[in-house]
Image (spheres, grey):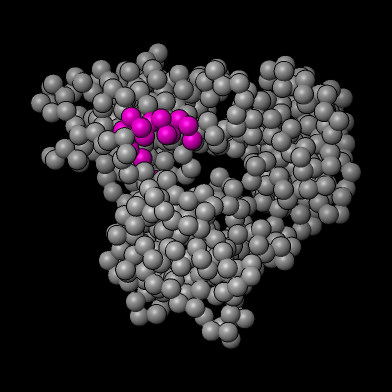
Amino acid sequence: MEERDLFDVVIVGGGPAGLSAAIYLARAKYRVLVLEKGNVGGQIRITDSVVNYPGVERTDGKSLAAAMARQAKRFGAEFAGEEVMDIHCNTAIKQVITKTRTYETLGILLACGANPRKLHFKGEEQFQGRGVAYCATCDGEFFTDRTVYVIGGGYAAVEEGLFLTRYAKKIVMIVREKDFTCARTIADKAKEHPKMEIHFQTEIVSVFGDAYVTGAVFVDNQTGKTWESDCEEEGIGIFVFAGYVPATDWLPSEFEKDQQGYLKTDRNQATNIPGVYGAGDLCVKNLRQTVTAVSDGAVAATSLELYVEKLHHELHIPELIQLSSDAEDKTALPQGDAIFDGDLKTQVKEFLSRMEKKVTMKVWAKQDGEQQEFVSFLTALAALSEKLSLEFATTREVEEEFQPVVRLLDGEGNDGGFGFHGIPTGEEFTSFLLAICRMGGQEGDLPDEAARLLLEAKESVKLKIFVSLTCTMCPETVRSAVNLAMSEQGRGKLKADVFDLSLFPKLREQYQIRSVPCIVINDDRVIFGRKGTRELAKAVFA
């Protein structure tokens, strides 16, 4: 086996636990790879204010996560934006299987966190995206000058409630317990805030409305009496922050978990499977905070060092080649600038070098005024690859599209089934580059169920996907649409158009969007929420 094919440790998940482990392992000169399907940083990225992390008086979650990632990269940790589908861990050299390839490794660290928990009150599923939401950062703006009800009494609920005060005219906290279950310092801020009203020992029963939530019913657990919110014709917000569900359902059945699905580990963060460790929110533990996730990662990393070193001796494996601190970062992409220069230019050119066929970016936009930035962005991008060219639609064609939009065509001028309306900056640029490379001949594997659904599909489907460029849940949905539309099975059967919702307020009102990502199927069915490739295929074709 070549040294470049083998890692000392593969870390599944790029949140604080995974990043902490990557720092420790890379600094100790082990070859470590971090696989993260979404945004590096995990759930902490949506935290507006971090004030309890030792040594850092005040920051935001996105900045703290970015600093951790930079530190890991400087020590030589490698990163890849991939979704892990399965692991094989019954042999000394283990396998981590993603949608695109299989990685071989001596040790595995599971640090894939947890996802927001749903409460299953009446109307929750029906009105998700139409008043019921789970991320203040992603959806808070949709409830400007409206009343918002925040369900939950823990740290996340209070913090998100305080964040929502910048948009809502009033915040009503609905807390099941007798008091908040977070630190008094943050609880006192909620109790003292002039925009906040608090109901303790209270639970949500149901929500109601027509196109979106206009009212809700609650129950007072002390008296047993129900009461109804004031109805607002323009809609109210129901933000649910009631804990998390561990992301462990994909793991093989031999892993030991508790009744709630949390992964069981010992004091060294070892699971019951030799060579596989766990860290962070997916583990059984009493406190789920950034500081405990970082601690888990450090403990797991030092335990893995001993395990991996032993395997090196037993299997006579020489020291693996660790990338230098200027290693390629497959997740480092532009954060709003339309000019490519320096390291960013090098990274994008390398990414585009994977293309085997020519791709044309066909642009529907006016080459002046407000849309000039859009045109400049694509012009600069086209200059980075000989296989990438730019074509402008005719005046008549421009009037036929929601502009600005760029669509991807193959070398013969055929539409590849993907278009982006707006400048795909931030994490969405990753998806846009992926679409270009898929169009350029780089194939990707689909989950078996998704491939089957596409093959069995009798009619083609058109998707409109509405996103916010600051949303942490949108990028995975967009990448899933790219995977489906540009797969061998999906060509001609799925057309996906992605819209930066901030540029299209009329469409927001037309589809009555109150949350992102929002997916419109054939202009008549609307669904909301983050979707992996398999989930999106089922939602569209099943």
Give the image quarter of residue 368. bottom right
User: Which of the two residues, 145 or 272, is positioned nearer the viewer here?
Assistant: 145
Q: Nearer the viewer, residue 332 or 176?
A: 332
User: Residue shown at 35%/80% (left/top)?
Assistant: 412
Q: Which residues are magenta?
A: 66-82
The answer to whether 410 appears left or right of 234 in the picture is left
Q: Is residue 23 left or right of residue 495?
A: left
Q: Position of residue 185 (x, y in %)?
A: 72, 18
Residue situated in front as seen by the camera: 259 or 468: 468
Could you tell me residue 416's position as x and y percent? Answer: 42, 72
Residue at position x 59%, y 75% from top?
Answer: 366
Relative vertical location of residue 529 with respect to residue 438 in this rendering, above or below: above
Q: Nearer the viewer, residue 456 or 484?
A: 484
Residue drawn at x 71%, y 40% is 239
Decide: is 313 above or below 483: above
Asked whether, in this view, residue 346 is left or right of residue 217, the answer is: left
